[in-house]
């Protein structure tokens, strides 16, 4: 594996929904230099942090990626475009606005492609979705986030998607009272408190 890949454990993803962890893989949607997803290796690192892949599966895909460098670069770019489409679609929903048509189309095209890699199979607990050739498909990570996105957009949880008051991250405000304002009280929440304290003391 590429040891230069970003270590996502350092930013403490929220793990509230796979789709939200994906859109929160950047610190700033306007500034590519603050994006933690700078390569396919970063995408693999993210996938392990959110437990979409285990170490062995990530290693296998890294081997496949190493043999297809051009495709790998294109897939990383596709993942970032898709992430922005999903982010803005969720943000529009959080702001009670209709989605941008281009963003929804980007997601729909990816969804059609994703579904062509799904099969109904019979398992012990009944019929379930299974992925075709997931172990060797560099696109597998993208299929999973696209499927997670449609799941969140169609679910009752959508009405609890909020943008943090202190950063670009989205979270699910499912607590009692639904008054959460920050992705994390220990980071953005404390920064906001410190800023208020500073402004108060400056005003004296
Ligand atoms: Zn935040």
Image (spheres, grey):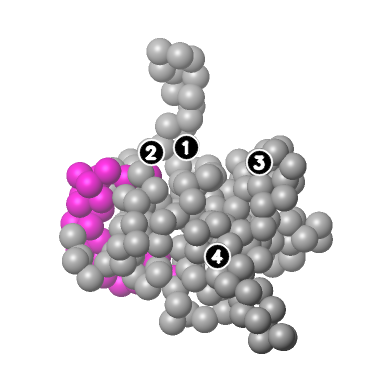
Q: Residues within 10 Å of mark 3 (few under 14, many from 20)?
A: few
- Is label 4 or label 3 in front? 4
Q: Find residue 3 and report its horizontal and vertical position in percent.
A: 19, 66
Residue 132 bears which disc, if any?
A: 2
Whether label 4 touches label 1, CB < 8 Å: no
Number of residue marks = 4
Q: Residue at x 45, y 42 (%)?
A: 117
Q: Which residues are magenta?
A: 52-77
Verify CB contact (< 8 Å) between mark 1 and mark 2.
yes
Residue at the image position 74 percent from the left and 42 percent from the top:
177
- Residue 76 vertical position relative to residue 179 in the rendered view, above or below: below
Percent x, y of residue 44: 31, 57
Q: Quadrant of residue 67?
A: bottom left
Asked if residue 58 lies in the magenta stretch, the reply is yes
Q: Which residue is mark 1?
A: 118
Q: Which residue is mark 4?
A: 190
Q: Which residue is mark 3?
A: 175
Label 4, secondary structure: give it.
Answer: helix
Magenta-colored segment: predominant secondary structure: helix
């Amino acid at each position: 594996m590429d040891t230069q890949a970003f270590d996502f454990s350092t930013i403490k993803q929220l793990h509230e929904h796979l789709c939200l962890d994906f859109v929160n893989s950047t610190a700033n949607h306007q500034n590519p230099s603050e994006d933690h997803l700078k390569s396919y290796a970063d995408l693999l690192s993210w996938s392990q942090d959110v437990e979409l892949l285990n170490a062995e599966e990530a290693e296998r895909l890294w081997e496949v990626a190493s043999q297809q460098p051009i495709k790998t670069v294109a897939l990383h770019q596709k993942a970032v475009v898709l992430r922005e489409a999903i982010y803005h679609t969720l943000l529009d929903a959080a702001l009670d606005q209709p989605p941008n048509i281009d963003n929804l189309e980007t997601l729909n095209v990816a969804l059609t492609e994703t579904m062509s890699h799904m099969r109904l199979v019979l398992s012990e607990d009944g019929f379930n979705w299974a992925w075709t050739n997931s172990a060797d498909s560099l696109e597998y990570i993208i299929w999973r986030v696209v499927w997670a996105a449609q799941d969140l957009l169609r679910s009752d949880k959508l009405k609890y998607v909020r943008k943090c008051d202190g950063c670009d991250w989205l979270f699910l405000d499912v607590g009692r009272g639904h008054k959460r304002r920050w992705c994390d009280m220990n980071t953005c929440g404390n920064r906001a408190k410190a800023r208020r304290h500073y402004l108060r003391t400056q005003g004296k």
